[in-house]
């Protein structure tokens, strides 16, 4: 995976194309100016397409069983997680989606990192990053901080959407010397794009 960050051609493609593709995805997955939950899965597919472009379809497996909760794709038979977040500060990175407080607590007591993670920080009209958080770095930070400081449980009495990485954990993960990153300027383009056009085109075909 690390070879992505050493390939100048791929690095430039990420810098140039990722903001544009994510912008199209936001248009596809928004209604009345608000993003839908499905935008995360759409962004994930864009990153997986990048991996297929880089490594080839033979070495990137996308048909992952739902039982592999942390794994989004297999690259050279190694599991990889893909996460995307928006904002100037990195937070809200989910480890598991659940609305069950008991399940969340149980997860926090047994969780251990199982794979490398690609983390994309989207920061429109400013600088964000495309990170690779190696499994060994995640394990090291978890051990150093301990579970209670590494994992953020949903607050009682709220409508929880899942268990998250804490701000302190994210800070240490993204600034670790073994973490790789690509700086991306998230410029919005003046896009003439309607998410319905391609479907209308299909209907117009004979």
Image (cartoon, rainbow, N blue to C red):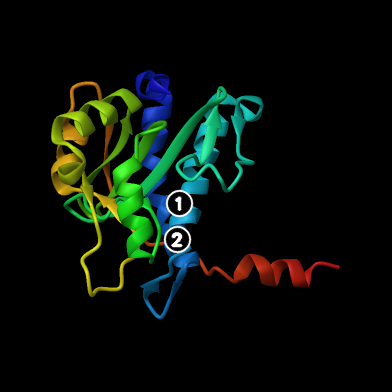
Q: Determine whether, in the image, residue 8 is placed left or right of residue 169.
A: right
Q: Residue at x 42, y 63 (%)?
A: 26
Which label sits on residue 43? 1
Toward the viewer: 30 or 141?
141
Q: Determine whether, in the image, residue 48 is placed left or right of residue 125.
A: right
The kind of secondary structure element at disc 1 is helix
> Residue 116: image x %, image y %?
39, 30
Q: CA distance from mark 1 to mark 2?
A: 6 Å
Residue 139 against residue 197 in the figure, above or below: above
Toward the viewer: 193 or 134?
134
Quarter residue 76 falls in? top right
Check contact, mark 1 vs mark 2: CB within 8 A: yes
Toward the viewer: 7 or 106?
106
- Residue of label 2: 39
Q: Determine whether, in the image, residue 187 is placed left or right of residue 167.
A: right
The kind of secondary structure element at disc 2 is helix
Query: Callout 2 environment at 10 Å: few (<14), some (14 to 19), or many (20+)?
Result: some
């Amino acid at each position: 995976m690390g070879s992505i960050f050493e390939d100048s051609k791929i690095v430039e493609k990420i810098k140039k194309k990722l903001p544009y593709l994510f912008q199209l995805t936001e248009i596809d997955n928004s209604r009345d100016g608000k993003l839908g939950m499905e935008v995360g899965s759409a962004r994930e597919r864009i990153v997986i397409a990048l991996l297929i472009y880089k490594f080839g379809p033979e070495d990137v497996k996308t048909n992952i069983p739902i039982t592999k909760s942390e794994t989004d794709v297999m690259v050279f038979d190694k599991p990889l997680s893909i996460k995307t977040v928006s904002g100037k500060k990195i937070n809200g990175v989910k480890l598991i989606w659940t609305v069950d407080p008991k399940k969340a607590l149980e997860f926090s007591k047994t969780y251990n990192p199982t794979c490398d993670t690609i983390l994309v920080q989207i920061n429109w009209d400013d600088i964000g990053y495309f990170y690779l958080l190696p499994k060994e770095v995640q394990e090291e930070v978890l051990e150093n901080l301990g579970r209670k400081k590494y994992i953020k449980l949903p607050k009682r009495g709220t409508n929880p959407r899942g268990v998250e990485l804490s701000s302190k954990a994210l800070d240490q993960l993204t600034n670790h010397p073994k973490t790789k990153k690509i700086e991306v300027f998230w410029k919005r383009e003046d896009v003439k794009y309607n998410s319905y056009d391609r479907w209308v085109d299909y209907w117009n075909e004979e």
